[in-house]
Amino acid sequence: MRFDPTDSPPLLQARGLVFARNEETIFGPLDFALHRGEIVLMEGDNGSGKTSLLKVLSGLLEPSAGEVLLEGAPLTLARLSHQVALLGHLLGLKLELDALANLRFAIGLGGIKPGITPQLALASVGLEGFERLPLRTLSAGQKKRVALARLLLVPAALWLLDEPYANLDRSGIELVNRLLDHHARAGGAALITSHGAYAYTSGTPRRIALHRGVGAAA
Amino acid sequence: MKPGTLGAACRAVLARDLSLVWRRRGDALNPLLFALIVIALFPFALGPDLPMLERIAAGTIFVALLLAMQLSLDTLFRSDLDDGSLEQLVVSPHPLAVLLFCKIAIHWLTTALPLLLIAPLAGQLLHLPDAVLPVLLAALALATPLLSLIGAVCVALTMGMRRSGMLLTLLVLPLIVPALIFGAGACNAAQAGLPYVAPLLWLGAWLVMALVLAPLAAAAALKISLT
């Protein structure tokens, strides 16, 4: 079942969002809304502020102006509701520990969706049989897959993914697209950044273009 | 415990940090060896003059143990910052201060507690009078968590910089001097047959204050250093 994208209030809304560092505007002002069931692709060159935008949206950075609303509530309060999962450049995984231990930590921190186990999540990202190996022994793409398995487990409705396609092979890219489709169909939403080399290919996602200093919402 | 609750999050942090320390147990032993070597070298350098060793024993053990603990401070949040775990802690729905408190607790358990356990042996090496040992242990039990907590705030403050080791030392040392004065002071008083409870109570009061305030300060400082 597709969720009606016009459901209100939107899952994520940015109003006049500006982020500046040392008096220099990195992006904005930016206005956009993200509804349940939507995948939005954010495109921009290196240094156009994509990562900063994701950090602002997840509450890691304070916007210089404007506000972020999660289901109509200011971000700081809504953050307490297990709504946001962030996958950044740094995966947040401990290389000394195995995949299962890393996922158990993520579950303890963020909770778990009903009807899924870490083993199932690892199997669905193609890492069956790698559960007990220290992540140090896995390739960069496989580590990324462990991080994707984390997204499958935690109950967050909003995924903020920074370059989810980096380090992944062709089947990995398809895997990301499949996970995103599934997430959108289940009523979730995702904001993905990409520098354009690989992108979300199924359907025609909404795109937001970021250029240094200005932000244009499409 | 239900996943996603604060209790489960704390347990997850405790379990993960404990197993990480276990994986790096060679590194974890470093402060212990450092303290033992420093304490063992003193009699060699100063000669086997028993009355003098007796006089300096408590203070020397105190200094050696506090410095040994400081060796491991820099790594408290470093690997979490480098691999992105810290971002995950911050965006998690739980209060960062509580999660940091768990991390600090593990730091104390894995560095200070082993040091406390070797304190009796260190006392023997320096000919510490047996009657003073309980006072020394009590003072260390109060002063070492204080160092973990104050150290965590300083580590969080210097986290934004690469190579912050030097600055960290400069920040932490003045802040732990009072703990050293009162802790070693209690031992010296006990050794001289004077009342020693008051300095211990002072240490206890500071510890209570640090237990409440330090995690909050560390959380605020870490959020700043992430930007």
Image (cartoon, rainbow, N blue to C red):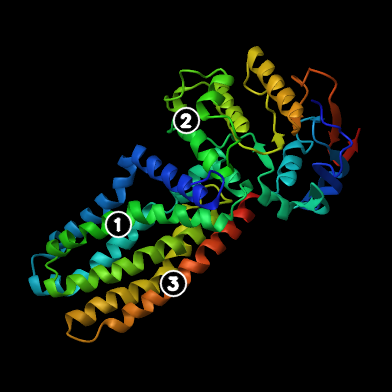
Q: Which residue, as the protein is rendered here, is positioned at the far bottom? A: B194
Chain name for mark 1: B
**Side of B221 relative to B66 (left or right):** right
Looking at the picture, does residue B168 appear above or below residue A16? Answer: below
Is A153 left, or right, of A70 in this rendering? left
Q: Are dots 3 and 2 on a single chain? A: no
Q: In the rendered view, tell whether residue A161 sits above or below residue B140.
A: above
Q: What chain letter is assigned to the residue under label 2?
A: A
| Whether residue A94 is visible | no
Q: Residue at 85% of width from left, 45% of height from top? A: A9
Which mark, by number, is residue B113?
Answer: 1
Residue A66 placement (x, y as % from top left): 84, 52
Mark number displayed over residue A17 = none
Q: Can you give x and y, in whole percent of width and height, for residue A184 in the image? A: 76, 28
Residue A100, horizontal then vertical, whole percent: 47, 30
Quadrant where the N terminus of chain A sits is: top right
Mark 1 to mark 3 CA distance (whole Å): 18 Å
At mark 3, the secondary structure is helix
Q: Which residue is mark 3?
A: B208
